[in-house]
Amino acid sequence: MKKYFIFMSVIFTVMFLSACAKSEGSEDIQMAPLKDIDSIHIENGSINLDIVSADIDEFEAYLLLYDNGPGIIMDKGKQKLTIRVKNDVTRLFKIGRMPQLEVRIPTEFKGEIIVDGSSGNVVGKELQTHNLKVNGRSGNVKLDFLHFQSDVYVNTTSGNVDVSLNEDEPDATLLLKSNSGRRSVGIVLNAHQQGKKETKGTAGSGDYEVQLETSSGNISLN
């Protein structure tokens, strides 16, 4: 009988540790050199995406998984790098257990970065990009620049857009468009034009283009 209880204790311990490991998730990691690469395309779909600029030599992608579904698919051409995750409709029903994708981009990369998503949120952290384009539908977009020196284009249907350039007088030409959402600008603009559906103006030398557009979402720029 004593051996039976010991055996059952071991079984329950293994089951408990397995459940904990599953709740913590696993990670799919992919890396790629960016020599001769002019553009990075990221297709995040309904998965939340974090974009981070970092002092690293290669592009890095990390996908946190809570299931045995598809991981990262990386296609590298002569001048283009594409990163995506295969669609899995069953994940839509796993509330709180959707995968989370993080990409880390070398600060030395000067090509374009294009993000195409649907309902997944996009968050940019400590960005030092040079040409960033984000397209989405209902997902929110929040971009935070460490050193602003980039063209920025964001287009969503109903997602909110929040961009922080973190400079009092960024060198930017600004265009904000929203059919029914609110627009807020915390930067002093020259040649400021305020219409019913759009806000225009320039700051500093106006070297970089910042265009933020959404149909029904709100826009905040500071």
Image (spheres, rainbow, N blue to C red):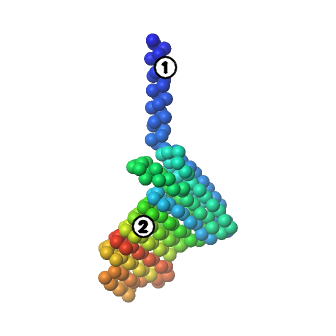
Name the amino acid, label 1: Phe
Tag of residue 189: none
Residue at point 46%, 21% (across, down): 8
- Judged from the image, the secondary structure of the residue bearing numbered disc 1 is helix
Tag of residue 7: 1
Residue at point 61%, 64% (across, down): 81
Asked if marks 1 and 2 touch (Cβ < 8 Å), the reply is no
Disc 2 crowd rating (10 Å Cα; few below 14, some 14-19, many 20+) is many
With respect to residue 56, does 204 lie above or below? below
Q: Give the image location of residue 191, x and y in percent.
A: 38, 87
With respect to residue 178, does 32 lie above or below? above
Taking the image as drawn, is residue 222 in sight?
A: no
Disc 1 crowd rating (10 Å Cα; few below 14, some 14-19, many 20+) is few
Q: Give the image location of residue 24, x and y in percent.
A: 46, 42
- Judged from the image, the secondary structure of the residue bearing numbered disc 2 is loop
Q: Locate residue 19 relative to residue 83 in the image: left or right.
A: left
Q: Work out whether mark 1 precedes mark 2 in sequence or the reverse, and give the earlier one.
A: 1
Name the amino acid, label 2: Arg
Furthest residue in direction front, as rendered? 89
Q: Nearer the viewer, mark 1 or mark 2?
A: 2
Residue at point 41%, 80% (across, down): 175
Which quarter of the figure is the C terminus placed in? bottom left
Which quarter of the figure is the N terminus placed in? top left
Residue at point 53%, 62% (across, down): 43
Q: Give the image location of residue 157, x and y in percent.
A: 40, 70
Taking the image as drawn, is residue 138 in sight?
A: yes
Furthest residue in direction top, as rendered? 1
Q: Which residue is mark 2?
A: 137
Q: CA distance from mark 1 to mark 2?
A: 53 Å
Q: Locate residue 91 relative to residue 194 in the image: left or right.
A: right
